[in-house]
Every structure is written in C-alpha cells, then in structure tokens.
Image (tube, coloured by chain):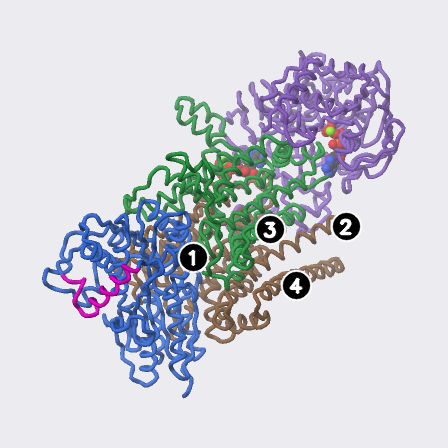
C-alpha cells in the first residue's frame, strides 16, 4: 500500500476531478433545461484536441481554452438544433456525435500527437498557501482547480438564487407552462445547451492542457464523457450532489491504483467501471423508493430512509422531450 | 377593462374549434362562459390570453384593436389566465412559482417577494406557506396562488378556465368571495364553467357556446332551463331501444373506491344485467372514466371489488377481464385504441386472429376484407390506420370487437363522429346487445344517452347521483344532476 | 395515387442526395483541413476495400458481425428501445464462447464444442440484454443508461477474466488469453480468409430476421408495441414481456457476433473483442432507417470504410479514423435532412 | 540493386517518443543503409486503436504491396505473426521480443530479435539509486511477463548496486516498487492510467520513477511536479530522444537502436542467408551510443549531476569489462526461492525466462 497522506489525497482528488467538474456542471445546466446532450464523450476529446493544437500553435492558453469552449458550443448547437428545432431524437443525435467527434479528434489531431505543448502551471494562492497543514497542498493548485470549485458554487447559486436559474428550472420541468409565463422556452433550452457545451469544451481543454497534458491517441480522457453523464444522474441533477459524485469518482480512481497492492485479485480496471454500477443502483433505488409504500416499508430502518432522502432526485420532467410551441 | 371579440375563428388542422365567435365583456363585471365539453371555450380563452393564435377575427381591448403573438404580450396588456390544465411547476416552491415570470433583474430577492406574496394573500384571506413545495398544495391552493400571481403582475382582466373543478366547497366559497371582491375593485373576470350553479352564484352575465358557436347570452338572474337548452340542444325524438329483456347480473361494483380523473370514484355500489344498455352521464372527469377503467380491469380499486359473473375480480388484470368477455374501447382512438403505422390487416392479425407463432396473414387479410366491407370502412386492408378519418377509425375499432362480448365498455364512443356515423354505429352496437351483450358507455352528449340507453347513471364528483331507467329519464332532471343539482343527491 | 407516389419517390431522391452532399462535403472539408488530398484519400479507401478479392474477404469478415448485431437491433428498435448495450452483449457472447472452448479443449469433439459455444454465446448475450430489459421494465432505469452501464461492467468482467482466471501462465497482459488450438477455429476453406460458414450464418440470420419480422407474431408484436404500447396492451399484448423478448433476441444475435469474433477472427479472447461493432451497428441501423433491406449494403459500406481506411496511414500518413468521420457524418446528415424535410412538410 | 520492400507493424504511433518510434527510426536506418530497401509501415496496430483488424490481415496487405520481409514490433503480435508466417512461407518474418525461434514453435521463416535492454535498465536503476533522496524508487510497469519482469529486476539490481556499493547505504533503506498498468501504454478505461500511477508515486514520497512503458507519462508528470517545486526525477524508456519531453526532470534514458540489427536481418533475407535465428543483441561496450554498432544505449539526461555522471561512466566500464555482473548469485525470487545460487551467474536463458520479481522488490510478480 502506498502511503498517501490525507492532505495529499485531498489535493489529488480536487485536482483530478477538476475537468470532470467542468463537464458535469455543464451537463447539469443543460439537462436542467430539459435537453440531454449525450455527445459528451466525443465533445471532450474534440475540444481537448482543439485546445492542444491551438495552444501549441499560438502559445496562448486563453485562446486554447476559448477555442475548446467554442468547439463544445458548436457540438451542442448541433444537438440542440436537431433536437429542439428539427424535432429529432436528442439521444440519437448525441450518440452519433459522440462517435463522430471522437474520430474527428483523432483524425485532425494526428499530426500533433505526442508533441510537447504549453501546459497550465500551478498558481499558489497568496496567504492561503501558508496555512499550516492544508495550505501547501490545497492552495497550490492550478487555476483550473480553483475555477472548478468556484464553478460548483456558482452553478448552485445560479440555478437556485437567480431569476435565470429559476426560469431554467421551469423550462426543464414544464416548457408549456414556462411559455405561458412569457419565457421563450426554446431559446432558454438552446441557451443552456450552448452554455453546457461551452463548459464541456473547457473540460476537454483542462484535460489536454493540465490534467493529462498533451495530445495523442489515446489521449486519456476517453470514457470520461460517459462517466460525466452517469454522475449527473447519480447526483440527481443537483449541482452539489453531482459535484460530490464527481469527487467520489476521482477518489475511487486514485484509490484504485493504491489498492493494487491490497486487493491484488481485483484488477485496477474494475475501479474504472465502478461509477456505472453505482449509477444503475441509484436509478433503481430512486425508482423503487418512489413506489407507494416504499416510505412505509423503510420507516423502521432509519439508515435506509436517510439513503432514500440522499439519493432522491427526479429528472427534469421535460428531459429529452421535444417541445413544440403552439 | 372592456373586451370585445369579433368573428373569432380557430382551426386546429381540420378541426374548426371556434366558428366566428362574437363576445363583449364589460368592465368590472364577472362574465360566465358556459358550454358542454369540446364547445370551444378553452380555445377562445387561450386566444384571448395570447397562448394560441386565432386563425382570424379581431380583439379589441377598451376599444383598441390588439394582436398578441405570445402570452407575454397579453400579460403586458393586463390579461392573465388561469388555465384549465394548471400551468405551474409542482417541484418548485410556492414562492418560486409566484416569482417566476415576474421578477426582473438577476437576483431573486426571496424576502421581498415573500412579503409581497403574504400581503396579497392576506388581502384575500388565503393561507399559503411560501416555502412549501407546490406539489404539497391542493388544487384550490394552487389556484389561489396563480390568482395572486396574476394580480401581482397587474392583470386587469382575469380569465379562469373551469376554476371550480377539483376544489372543495369551502375553497370554492373562498374563491368566489375573492372574485367578487376583485370585480368590486374594478377588475374584469371571465369564468369558464360547465356548472350552472357556479355561474348562478357568481356571474353578472353569461355567454353559452355550443360546437364552436355562441348559442345564447343572458343577464342575471338566469333561467337554468334556458341555459340547459342552449348548452345541450333540444332533446331528440324517441330513440330505438334494445328489444331484449334484461337477464341476470353480469357486472357488479361493491363499495368500490378508486383514484383517477379529477374526482376519483367514491364508494360505488351498482350492478348491471345481461343485455342492458347503460349510459354514463356527467361532466368529464366526474368519475365515469375511472368507473369504465375499473370495469375493464385497467385500474385496480383502492377499496371494494368488481364482480364479473359473480366472480370476485380482485387481482385480475385487463387481460384476465378480456378473457372473460370484457371489451374496452378508449376515447382517444389513435392514442390508445389503434396503432399508427400498422395497417388494418395487421390490426386484425393482432386482435382478431388465432394467436399462433406464425401470423395467419391470409386469414387476417380475409377477415380484414370482410369486416372492412361489413363495417363500411373507407379504406383497403393495406391502409395504415392513421390515414383513416376519425369516423373510419371508430368503425375499425368497432370491427375489432370480438363476436359476442359479454360486457362492452365504451368511452365516449361517438365523440367526433358525424350524425350519420353515430347512428350507424349505434345500430350495430344495439344489434350486439340483442344477443345479450351488456353495454356501458359514457358520453358528453345527453341527447345521445337519452337516445340509446335504457338505463342512465349520472356521475357527479366521483359519485353516482342518479340511477334511473330510460322510462323515468327526463332530460331536465338529468341535466340538473349533471350540473350537480340532483334532487335526490346529498 | 400514382402521382403521389411519384412525388414521394422524388422527395426521397432529393433527401438522399442532400444527405450525401452534406456528409461528403463535410468530410471533404475535414480532409482538406488536415492538408491532404480528399480524392486520393477516397480512392485509397475504395482500392483498399474492394480492390482485390482478398480485400473483399476482409470486408466480409467485418460485415458478418455488423450484420448480426444490426439484425438484433432491428427487434429492439422496432419495439421502441434504444439498445445501446450491444457492445456488452457482444462481449458476453465472446466470454461464453471462450468458456465453452476452454472447457471443451480437453473434451475433444470439436464440432460439438463449436456448436455448443455458439449456443452458449447466444444465451449469454441474451441474458445480458435481458438484464438491461429488466432494469428498464422493472427497475425504472432508462435502457440507454442501463445498457451503457452494463457495457462498462462487461468490460470489467472481460478484463478480470483475462487478467485473472484466464490469464496466460505467468503473464498478466491485455493481449488476451492463450490462442485456441486450430481444430477449435471456425472451419474455413483453404486459401479463404473468411469462413464460408460465417457468411452463410450471417445471410441465414438476415433472412431469418426478415422472416421473423414479417411473418411471425414476434415481428407483429414488436412493431405494434413500438408504435403504441397502450393500444397494444388493450389489443391483448403484454408490452413488458415482449420488450424482454426483443432484448433477448438482440442480445442473442450480438452474442453470436461475439462468438464469431472469438472463433473466426481472434481465436482467443482479447479485451477489445467487440471491436466497437456494437456501437457501429447502431449507426448502421439508424442509417438503414430501421429497415432490414438496407442493412446488408450499409453494413458492407461501413465495413469497407473500416477496412479500406487502413490504407490511409500506409499511403498518405493520414489517420484512419476518417472512416468513423464518414460514417458518423452520414448518419448525422440523415437525421438533419430528415428532420428538416419533416419540418418543411409540417409548415406547408 | 533491385528494390527490397519490407513492412513494419508498429504497436503504437510511429511518433510516440518511445518504443514504436525507435523501431520506426530503425526502419529509416535500413532504408538509408541498404540500397534499394523500402519501408512500408502501419502504426497503432493494436485492437484498441484498430478494432477488428488482425495481424494476418495486415500482413496480407503488406505482402500484396510487395513486402518480402515483415517486422512485428510487439510481444502482443506473437500469435498473429506466427499465423501469418505459416500463411506466407515465402515471406520472411521478424518478431521483436519473441522467442519462437528459440523455443522452436515458429516456422523457418520467422526470426526473433531483441536488445539486451537489461544493461540499459541497470544503468537506469543505477542513476536512480544514485539520485534518490528518499530512497524510494517507483517503477511504472506495463504488463507482467518474462520480459518486463527481467527488465524491472535489472533496474532494481542497478539501483541496489548504486545504493549499497556506491552510496554505502543499508540495503533495507531502499524501497523499490513496481506498479503494473496492464499494457504497454494507456488504454483509457482498460489499463490503469499511467499519469495517475506516476502521480501516486510522487505524491507518496517516491522521488524517482523509472518508466517501463512505451510512452512518456512518468516524465511528463515529473516535469509538472518540478514546476511545483518538488525535487523529483524520472527515467523514460525506449527512445533516445525521450528526454526532450521534460529535460529538467530527466535523469537519462535507456534506449534501443534497432537499425544495425534490422540491417543484419534484411541483408540475410536479401542474400538468401536467412536462418530462423534468435538475436539478443547487446551494447557495443566500446561506445554504447554508437548508432551503427550498438543495439542498446543509455543517454544521460540533463538532470543528472556531474558527479553521478562520472560514477555512471565507471559503472558502464565495469559492466563492459565484466568486472561487475549484477546477475551473479546469490539472488532470490520474491517468494524466497533461489534464482541464482551463490557463486554462480545466471545464463541467458535463466535471465530470459525469469519467473518472478526478485527479493527486495515490491509489487506483483505475476497476475494472481
Ligand atoms: N391542440 C389542439 N389540437 C387539435 N384540436 C384541439 C386542440 N385543442 C382543442 N382541440 C379541439 O378543439 C375543440 C374545442 O376544444 P376546447 O378545449 O376549446 O373545448 P372546451 O370547450 O374547453 O371543452 P372542455 O369543457 O372539455 O374543456 C375540441 O374538439 C378539441 O378536441
Ligand atoms: N391501464 C392501462 N391502460 C393503458 N395501457 C396500459 C395500462 N396498463 C398498462 N398499460 C400499458 O402496458 C404496458 C405494460 O403493462 P404491464 O406492466 O401491466 O404489462 P406486463 O408487465 O407485460 O404484464 P405482467 O405484469 O403480467 O407481466 C405499460 O407500460 C402501458 O404502456
Ligand atoms: Mg376546456
Ligand atoms: Mg406489469
């Protein structure tokens, strides 16, 4: 067993989860508005490639992040355009894009594989970094990590504390009712699909410029999009719970490697797939606990009741449903 | 606000829902809109609220012609509407529902808006907890909230589409009290309803719609007989009746309660004999829909039991009922009864042929040919059902009924059919009942019930309030019972 | 009537032309972006896939599993399910086939063992799909996430087997299990690169699927439930049970594809045994507009792209993932053009 | 001279700054040195990158393009290349790192080649042992097999030598841990993530990570950690130019130089002198980094101190002269059984078929 101090572990989790946080927060916003963008896995790779190439050619990290975000916006625009305006199944379009963007990334990025490109460095926070114990590990991170933590709070505050967040939730629940209140439901859905796509694009950039720097085939971010989608469900479409789910996943990944020594019969790969059974379990649990009588049955078992409350989460009611304005 | 609607027409594809409606509503009055199901009331109101766009016609507010392209524009002109199907957000809190659509700027000042809500609520004696999730509120409370929200938005014309369905008598009193207060304060109120008593208690004037047209207008005090006549048309001449004498008991409900519809079904005990034709009257959602679904085994009772041929059917599902001779035809033909994309032959292969592994296509085709001919369906066996007209879809559904069912349950069987088709259909069905089939059907049209049924049940608010044989049936009494004024109901 | 048909045919032709134009102009722009000559690229793909009989045989080797998976998907798409779990079902089929072969290697009687492994693969793939089906009908889990989750679990299982119980002696590697003895390979004809049995089986499955969908109650039930579960229920079908049946059929055929990968392609179990055919076959069926007639040609076209694109790195130093870009953009263009045409139709 | 086309099957990208690029450059060397030789290559030949593609299929393609000799550069291709060699008896095959010619399992047209990387790894271990401040060295292992075990063990022996003999530290204060990722390079979702493994090493006090995989993640992470101000180092593998990735963290790189060996095999095939031989080529001790003669080399990295550099030179000289033989007994396997008895030295086949990691190393010897 490798000895990891608690602080180092925490710092590792914070840094390792940062790109995924960007993606899961983006997808949470998109899904809250009732649009499901299934293309995350491809989008992340395509934007990771774009970010690396732009950074390599221009030496500007800002430009690279912007370009990656733009790629995310463009992919999301296809999903939203075909899904909201052309009435095609969002799932079908998203799925095709997942596969296609991935191949597109490999194809266009081929000449840039395994080159040395710019990376995002660490930005120790003045004063905070000097706090004994936690300071040196928690506050010596890249600005992406700080941004990811801030994004959780911002997403939460945006969704629950602003007018736009309220409108966003309303559209995801009942677009017709939102329309009756003077909200342009389609435009709101489009907007948050694009905003979500932008964040997912940034996640790709965070992978190729910071967490797994460089481009190549494989880049290392493969599969992360699916995991992000699973985590959004696991977190019941609540930004804070989604963030906790993301950190849990990052922790599992780090521990998975350390556990090679402890549990030699379990291949490390098994820890990579852990989020999926967890997600399925959560969904079944949500379904069963919504049945009449479930609450009564759990009444005698306080831990079960608590788990039920924790995992309770309902999908935005209009999620993935095409909305036709009358 | 003074409202004038001129020659309003509305087409939903081929459906002509409003056929040149003129309506004038004076400022500071409570104006009622009455009409049977499908008369076009909601359509007209939604046009006025900007939720849908009229096909043609003119809207004048205080003498000024206006055009709304969306609800926001109407709302800015001071028009607010409470929709028939509540357009609110159950997962959000009361306060969030209140704020949604009227907050400007970015921040949600919960405290400020909470205070505003409380103040308004006090004005009307409403009790609302701003932080409760809307889902925990009763229909009446949700309505109150919507009302407050519209007022807070500055509505000067309030449209309420069937506000009294699904709320308790106490809440109804509170609501009426509030509406009268609003009218006194100079607001204009438009109330859509089926119920004469509501209108009598509330309105200064009513307009009656029937099949997309205005059939009458009247000032308070109202004469309910005239209103009923305008609403349901004149009773028809004596209908052809089923010749068969009633036989033994086939279907029975014993103290059945169930949820569903607006009112659910409450403690219902009733039984039916072989060969009876029973009409279920009542406003939509008064319990007759749930009743039919319980009788078909599509829904399970919360309490009590349904008996078929004396057998307790608790625990049996629809397929079991079907095996025992119960057939159910739903209202929404394309949504629930037929399968778009499948041809007529395929429907027969599914429903009317031997259930072998290899589909007996030749038999199905033969069957389809004969039945298409016998039921005069305009189409060929290869026609896919969504290509059939509504009437022909209905004929197809009828043709799918197995040869001699024990119990036939029909939900609004003639809705959307022209007179000729309806007559033809009844001829066929009454032929079945001559062979001993018991028919239970619901209908929004009293004429139809009086024409064919030999027993009439009237549902109101989840209960059977009137159970009479055709001989005793008199349209006025039934009409009154439908509107909740059954002389012998509690 | 005749005229209406003429107009319909015309609009289909216009749609197909628009789709092809959209997809290929996109891929051409992509190739130009990479700084390579598009025509040469397309030329190499064509030559590399149908340029010789050897190449055609290689294309057919890919065609077989694609057709098997796509046929299975017809059942689930017909009944209105998005069976994204084909990938996992292929894997489970491959695992089952391997298990039987490992056990059977000691027993002898290769023909019997081979047949048994095919049956086991179908059974196992079917059960894996059934799990997704039960999660959907009883557990309230959307079949997309159930299927996806089970895909990853299947990958976990195959890795565990290859790393653990089935590893080569002393070795823990991604490179797979010990290869099977030659008599446990799917028999082939000397000089052929593809087993005629596999080809015959794929054609057989294609015909059988067509026959099942057209003439048997399975097809009718799937079609009915997919279009209207409520009405089907009222007309006497049990949608939940049929959904499970459809999932089992799809999973069984996917499992068969998995067995084919083991018996005829790799002759051992490797982690990437499913070769992405599960996902690719979803694209095939979507592009085929869920109609069986289009599956063989589209599967052949996709297989040809996969095989032919290997020429790109050899001849032009290009990445072969261009094949995936072409496949994806074709399906995407179909969706967009179709949606756009419907929108215009509605507007008029 | 007439054209001689040879094909190269590369398991990774031709430009991976590692194993595959070293082979690719070996191929270029052949083109340069053998008149008329022409290379065609296919890279990323692995089932994750090219799903559904098999080795025999690619060989068919290369043969149809006129290839007369085909080199397969991965252990992973063992079964496929044997099958292809049987299908094409008139074409010559070279399987890198395999042993079919030694074990007699392969046909006559199949030869094997490998470099004696054990020496390179010893040097890597040596500089790691010299440099480590914490006494903890991590080894980023690919998959477990005989080759990877003997390479990890050689690294350990080099490190132990430096630690005990040069730095005169007690043996039990040296920690040497091997973590296997499961393949020669990262396959997301399939292998363990090497970036994460390297990070874990550095985060838990290992200050030198020696890479045994084809790609440069260890060095990349070390470079990042350096930017954070940590004193850590890494040693990449396979490719002479690998240090470029993060020079300030690079202690050096043991690498292969496939050119000379390839030339030998190509000439054998051209001249009809072909044998199904098993070549295990060592360094040219007179000049380890000679492009034309040495099969294995070691380039000291920019991060290596001058003092260590001198010690390394002495160590290399001793290895070359035979004064130091790290495979001299007594050596024990992890489970305590004897690998080499005291007073004896291991033979080539003993080393080639090493069954476990050595005592003193932590990590799995084989899959459980
Ligand atoms: N969105 C729509 N699309 C097509 N037809 C519609 C639509 N909405 C209403 N209709 C049809 O228009 C007619 C009038 O409907 P409307 O809802 O206005 O009736 P209503 O008088 O409000 O009846 P109810 O008392 O049942 O609410 C009906 O025949 C109905 O089926
Ligand atoms: N009351 C109903 N009215 C209309 N459709 C229904 C009704 N009940 C069920 N259905 C339709 O049938 C589907 C499946 O129904 P159900 O779960 O009862 O069948 P089943 O599971 O096949 O039967 P069983 O539980 O005996 O195995 C539902 O999703 C719904 O579409
Ligand atoms: Mg209405
Ligand atoms: Mg059921």
Left or right of C101, for residue A246:
right
Which residue does the numbered mark 2 point to in the structure image? C348
Which residue does the numbered mark 3 point to in the structure image? A70
First reached walking from the N terminus: tag 1 or tag 4: 4
The answer to whether the residue labelled 3 contacts the one labelled 2, judged by CB atoms less than 8 Å apart, is no
* Residue A40: image location, x then y, percent: 53, 48
Q: Nearer the viewer, residue A244 or C200?
A: A244
Magenta span has D304? no
Helix, strand or loop at label 4? It is helix
Which residue does the numbered mark 4 point to in the structure image? C21
Which residue does the numbered mark 1 point to in the structure image? C274
* Magenta stretch, residue numbers: D306-328
**Residues at marks 4 and 2 on the same chain:** yes
Chain D colour as displayed = blue
Q: In the image as oriented, which residue stretches furthest toward the bottom?
A: D1
Helix, strand or loop at label 1? It is loop
First reached walking from the N terminus: tag 4 or tag 2: 4
Q: Which chain is purple?
A: B
């Amino acid at each position: 067993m490798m000895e990891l101090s608690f602080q180092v572990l925490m710092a590792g989790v914070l840094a390792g989860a940062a790109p995924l946080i960007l993606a899961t927060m983006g997808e949470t916003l998109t899904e809250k508005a009732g649009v499901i963008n299934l293309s995350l896995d491809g989008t992340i790779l395509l934007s990771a490639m774009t970010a690396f190439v732009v950074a390599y050619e221009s030496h500007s990290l800002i430009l690279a992040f912007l370009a990656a975000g733009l790629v995310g916006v463009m992919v999301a625009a296809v999903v939203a355009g075909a899904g909201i305006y052309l009435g095609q199944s969002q799932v079908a379009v998203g799925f095709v894009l997942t596969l296609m963007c991935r191949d597109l990334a490999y194809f266009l990025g081929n000449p840039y594989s395994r080159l040395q490109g710019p990376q995002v460095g660490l930005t120790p926070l003045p004063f905070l970094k000097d706090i004994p114990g936690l300071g040196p590990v928690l506050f010596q991170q890249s600005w992406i990590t700080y941004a990811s933590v801030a994004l959780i709070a911002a997403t939460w505050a945006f969704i629950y504390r602003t007018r736009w967040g309220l409108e966003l939730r309303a559209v995801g629940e009942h677009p017709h009712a939102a329309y009756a209140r003077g909200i342009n439901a389609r435009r709101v859905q489009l907007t948050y699909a694009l905003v979500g796509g932008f964040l997912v694009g940034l996640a790709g950039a965070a992978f190729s410029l910071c967490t797994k720097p460089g481009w190549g085939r494989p880049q290392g971010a493969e599969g992360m999009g699916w995991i992000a989608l699973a985590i959004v469900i696991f977190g019941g479409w609540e930004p804070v719970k989604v963030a906790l789910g993301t950190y849990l996943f990052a922790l599992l990944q780090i521990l998975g490697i350390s556990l090679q020594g402890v549990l030699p019969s379990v291949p490390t790969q098994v820890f990579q797939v852990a989020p999926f059974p967890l997600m399925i379990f959560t969904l079944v649990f949500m379904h069963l606990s919504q049945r009449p009588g479930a609450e009564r049955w759990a009444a005698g078992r306080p831990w079960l009741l608590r788990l039920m409350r924790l995992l309770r989460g309902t999908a935005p009611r209009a999620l993935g449903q095409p909305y036709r304005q009358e | 606000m003074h409202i004038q609607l001129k020659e309003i027409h509305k087409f939903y594809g081929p459906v002509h829902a409003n056929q040149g409606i003129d309506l004038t509503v004076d400022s500071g009055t409570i104006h009622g809109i009455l009409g049977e199901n499908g008369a076009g009331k909601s359509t007209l109101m939604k046009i006025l609220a900007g939720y849908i766009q009229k096909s043609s016609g003119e809207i004048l507010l205080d003498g000024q012609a206006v055009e709304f392209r969306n609800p926001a524009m109407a709302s800015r002109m001071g028009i607010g509407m409470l929709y028939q199907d509540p357009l609110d957000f159950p997962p959000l809190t009361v306060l969030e529902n209140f704020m949604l659509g009227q907050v400007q700027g970015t921040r949600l000042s919960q405290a400020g808006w909470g205070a505003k809500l409380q103040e308004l609520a006090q004005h009307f004696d409403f009790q609302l907890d701003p932080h409760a999730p809307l889902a925990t509120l009763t229909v009446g409370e949700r309505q109150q909230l919507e009302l407050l929200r519209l007022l807070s938005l500055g509505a000067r014309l309030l449209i309420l589409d069937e506000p009294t369905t699904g709320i308790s008598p106490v809440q109804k009193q509170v609501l009426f009290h509030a509406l009268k207060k609003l009218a006194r304060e100079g607001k204009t109120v438009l109330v859509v309803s089926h119920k004469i008593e509501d209108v009598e208690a509330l309105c200064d004037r009513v307009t009656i719609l029937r099949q997309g047209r205005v059939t009458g207008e009247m000032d308070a005090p109202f004469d309910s007989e005239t209103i009923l006549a305008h609403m349901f048309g004149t009773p028809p001449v004596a209908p052809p009746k089923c010749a068969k004498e009633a036989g033994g008991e086939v279907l029975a409900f014993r103290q059945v309660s169930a949820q569903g519809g607006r009112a659910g079904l409450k403690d219902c005990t009733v039984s039916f004999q072989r060969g009876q034709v029973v009409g279920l009257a009542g406003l939509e959602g008064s319990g007759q829909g749930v009743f039919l679904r319980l009788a078909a085994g599509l829904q399970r009772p919360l309490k009590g039991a349904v008996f078929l041929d004396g057998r307790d059917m608790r625990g049996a599902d629809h397929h079991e009922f079907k095996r025992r001779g119960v057939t159910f035809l739903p209202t929404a033909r394309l949504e629930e009864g037929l399968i778009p994309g499948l041809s007529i032959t395929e429907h027969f292969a599914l429903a009317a042929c031997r259930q072998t592994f290899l589909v007996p296509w030749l038999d199905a085709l033969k069957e389809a040919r004969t039945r298409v001919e016998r039921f005069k369906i305009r189409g060929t066996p290869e026609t896919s059902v969504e290509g059939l007209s509504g009437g022909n879809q209905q004929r197809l559904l009828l043709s799918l009924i197995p040869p001699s069912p024990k119990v036939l349950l029909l939900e609004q069987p003639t809705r959307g059919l022209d007179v000729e088709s309806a007559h033809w259909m009844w001829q066929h069905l009454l032929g079945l009942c001559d062979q001993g089939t018991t028919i239970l059907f619901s209908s929004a049209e009293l004429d139809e019930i009086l024409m064919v049924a030999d027993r009439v049940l009237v549902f109101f608010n989840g209960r059977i309030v009137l159970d009479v044989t055709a001989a005793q049936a008199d349209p006025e009494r039934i009409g009154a019972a439908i509107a909740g004024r059954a002389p012998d109901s509690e | 009537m005749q005229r209406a048909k003429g107009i319909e045919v015309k609009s289909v032709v216009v749609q197909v032309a628009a789709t092809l134009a959209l997809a290929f102009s996109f891929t051409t722009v992509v190739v130009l972006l990479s700084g390579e000559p598009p025509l040469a690229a397309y030329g190499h793909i064509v030559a590399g896939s149908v340029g010789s009989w050897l190449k055609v045989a290689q294309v057919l080797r890919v065609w077989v599993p694609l057709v098997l998976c796509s046929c299975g998907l017809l059942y689930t798409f017909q009944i209105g399910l998005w069976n994204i779990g084909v990938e996992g079902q292929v894997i489970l089929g491959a695992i089952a086939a391997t298990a039987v072969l490992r056990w059977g290697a000691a027993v002898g009687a290769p023909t019997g063992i081979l047949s048994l492994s095919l049956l086991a693969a179908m059974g196992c793939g079917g059960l894996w799909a059934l799990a997704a089906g039960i999660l959907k009908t009883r557990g309230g889990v959307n079949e997309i996430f159930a299927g996806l989750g089970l895909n990853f679990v299947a990958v976990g299982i195959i890795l565990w087997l290859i790393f653990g119980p089935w590893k080569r002696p002393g070795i823990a590697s991604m490179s797979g299990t010990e290869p099977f003895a030659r008599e446990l390979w799917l028999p082939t004809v000397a000089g052929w690169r593809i087993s005629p049995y596999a080809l015959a089986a794929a054609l057989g499955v294609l015909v059988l699927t067509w026959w099942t969908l057209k003439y048997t109650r399975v097809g009718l039930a799937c079609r009915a439930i997919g279009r209207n579960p409520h009405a089907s229920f009222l007309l006497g079908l049990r949608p939940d049970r049929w959904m499970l049946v459809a999932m089992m059929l799809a999973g069984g055929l996917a499992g068969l594809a998995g067995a084919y990968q083991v018996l005829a392609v790799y002759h051992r179990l490797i982690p990437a045994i499913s070769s992405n055919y599960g996902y690719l076959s979803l694209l095939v069926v979507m592009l085929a507009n869920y109609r069986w007639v289009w599956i063989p040609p589209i599967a052949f076209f996709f297989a040809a792209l996969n095989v032919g694109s290997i020429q790109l790195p050899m001849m032009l130093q290009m990445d072969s993932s261009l094949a995936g870009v072409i496949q994806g953009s074709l399906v995407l263009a179909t969706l967009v053009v179709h949606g756009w045409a419907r929108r215009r139709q509605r507007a008029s | 001279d007439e054209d001689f086309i040879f094909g190269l099957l590369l398991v990774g990208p031709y430009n991976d700054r590692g194993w595959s690029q070293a082979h690719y450059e070996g191929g270029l060397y052949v083109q340069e040195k053998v008149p008329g030789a022409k290379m065609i290559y296919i890279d990323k030949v692995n089932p994750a990158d090219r799903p559904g593609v098999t080795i025999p299929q690619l060989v068919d393609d290369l043969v149809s393009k006129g290839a007369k000799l085909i080199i397969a550069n991965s252990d992973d291709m063992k079964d496929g290349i044997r099958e292809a060699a049987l299908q094409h008896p008139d074409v010559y095959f070279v399987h890198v790192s395999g042993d079919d010619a030694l074990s007699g399992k392969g046909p006559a047209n199949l030869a094997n080649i490998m470099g004696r990387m054990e020496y390179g790894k010893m040097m890597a271990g040596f500089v790691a042992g010299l440099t480590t401040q914490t006494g903890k060295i991590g080894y980023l292992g690919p998959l477990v097999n005989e080759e990877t075990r003997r390479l990890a063990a050689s690294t350990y022996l080099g490190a132990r030598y430096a630690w005990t003999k040069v730095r005169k530290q007690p043996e039990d204060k040296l920690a040497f841990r091997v973590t296997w990722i499961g393949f020669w390079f990262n396959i997301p979702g399939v292998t363990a993530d090497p970036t994460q493994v390297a990070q874990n090493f550095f985060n838990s006090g290992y200050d030198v990570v020696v890479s045994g995989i084809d790609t440069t993640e260890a060095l990349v992470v070390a470079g990042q950690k350096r930017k954070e101000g940590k004193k850590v180092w890494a040693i990449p593998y396979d490719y002479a130019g690998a240090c470029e990735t993060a020079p300030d963290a690079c202690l050096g790189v043991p690498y292969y130089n496939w050119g000379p060996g390839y030339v030998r095999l190509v000439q054998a095939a051209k001249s009809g002198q072909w044998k199904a031989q098993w070549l295990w080529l060592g360094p040219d001790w007179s000049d380890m980094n000679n492009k034309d003669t040495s099969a294995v080399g070691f380039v000291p990295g920019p991060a290596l101190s001058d003092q260590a550099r001198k010690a390394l030179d002495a160590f290399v000289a001793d290895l070359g002269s035979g004064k130091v033989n790290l495979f001299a007994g007594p050596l024990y396997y992890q489970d305590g059984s004897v690998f080499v008895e005291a007073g004896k030295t291991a033979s080539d086949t003993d080393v080639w078929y090493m069954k476990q990691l050595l005592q003193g190393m932590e990590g799995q010897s084989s899959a459980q």
